[in-house]
């Protein structure tokens, strides 16, 4: 969990205490975020890299707040990327994001990487992009601002294990030239597929979500989730 609230320095702290602190590459810029501070990426070489680690394989939720400086995404890939396991993948020249997952091979078996791509009307505003996959059910989903925007039924295979880094603002593909022009806030990764009610609690920020009484508003308790990542 990387909330980007430091406001200075070149380290994005892993708020779970798990030691997966992100390191700046290039020159990400501290700016005002949706909640507290955020990081602005120039699309030319700035990104954050989370150290290599084993990704969840049974189920996953990946979420990030993002705001584009332009009416369409500047480049493919890059929002939250762990090749070859999963990517929240903006599609260049559009307002849409894809959610490619390697489930018994890449991507979105038995379909293709771009299946189910979707986006909001205006990406120059802040939006919370949340993507989930549960290998037990095969359910794949993209939520925008906690509203279910796209769903697929994928093969019920585990997510492929990958021990490499997670990149935020960079997609290590195709010659390594995919950098996002974007401001990003509150990146979180869980090894459960959160339900919509859980995702809704994140709309007020992760500090608020972690303070919610799980017996009151949540279907997945943060007591379970907080120990992940």
Image (cartoon, grey):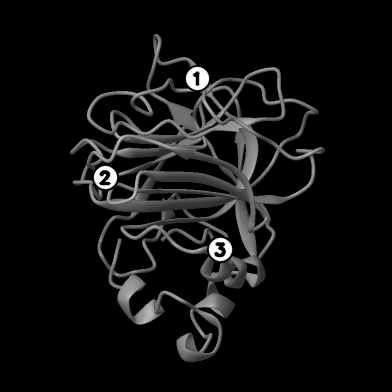
- From where the camera sits, is residue 10 visible? yes
- Tag 1–tag 2 contact (CB < 8 Å): no
Q: Name which of mark 1 and mark 3 comes first in the sequence.
A: 1
Q: Secondary structure at mark 2?
A: loop
Instruction: Give the class, few, some or many, for how many residues have Cα within 10 Å of label 2's Cα (few <14, many ≥20).
Output: some
Instruction: Give neighbour class at mark 3: few <14, some 14-19, many 20+ (Cα, 10 Å).
Output: some
- Residue in front for this viewpoint, 10 or 153: 153
Quarter-of-image position of residue 104? top left
The residue pinned by badge 1 equals 178
Decide which of tag 2 and tag 3 comes sooner along the chain.
2
Asked if 126 appears above or below 107 in the picture, the reply is below
Q: Earlier in the sequence, mark 1 or mark 2?
A: 2
Q: Which residue is mark 3?
A: 196
Would residue 176 be found to the left or right of residue 98 on screen?
Answer: left
Could you tell me how far apart the alpha carbons at marks 2 and 3 are, in whole angstroms? 29 Å
Task: Name the residue that disc number 2 marks.
Answer: 51
| Vertical side of 66 occupied by 178: above or below | above
**Within the image, what quadrant is residue 24 found in?**
top left
Report the front residue among 46 and 77: 77
């Amino acid at each position: 969990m990387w909330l980007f609230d430091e406001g200075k320095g070149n380290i994005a702290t892993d708020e779970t205490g798990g030691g997966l602190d992100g390191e700046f590459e290039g020159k990400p810029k501290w700016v005002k975020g949706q909640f507290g501070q955020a990081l602005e990426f120039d699309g030319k070489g700035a990104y954050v890299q989370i150290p290599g680690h084993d990704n969840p394989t049974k189920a996953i939720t990946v979420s990030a707040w993002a705001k584009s400086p332009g009416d369409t995404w500047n480049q493919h890939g890059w929002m939250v990327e762990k090749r070859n396991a999963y990517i929240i993948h903006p599609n260049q020249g559009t307002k849409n994001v894809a959610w490619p997952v390697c489930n018994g091979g890449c991507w979105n078996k038995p379909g293709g990487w771009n299946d189910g791509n979707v986006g909001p009307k205006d990406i120059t505003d802040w939006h919370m992009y949340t993507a989930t996959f549960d290998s037990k059910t095969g359910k794949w989903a993209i939520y925008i601002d906690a509203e279910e925007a796209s769903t697929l039924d994928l093969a019920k295979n585990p997510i492929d294990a990958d021990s490499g880094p997670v990149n935020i603002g960079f997609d290590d593909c195709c010659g390594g030239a995919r950098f996002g022009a974007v401001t990003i806030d509150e990146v979180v990764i869980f090894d459960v597929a959160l339900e919509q009610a859980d995702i809704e609690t994140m709309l007020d920020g992760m500090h608020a979500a972690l303070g919610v009484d799980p017996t009151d508003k949540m279907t997945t308790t943060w007591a379970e989730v907080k120990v992940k990542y």
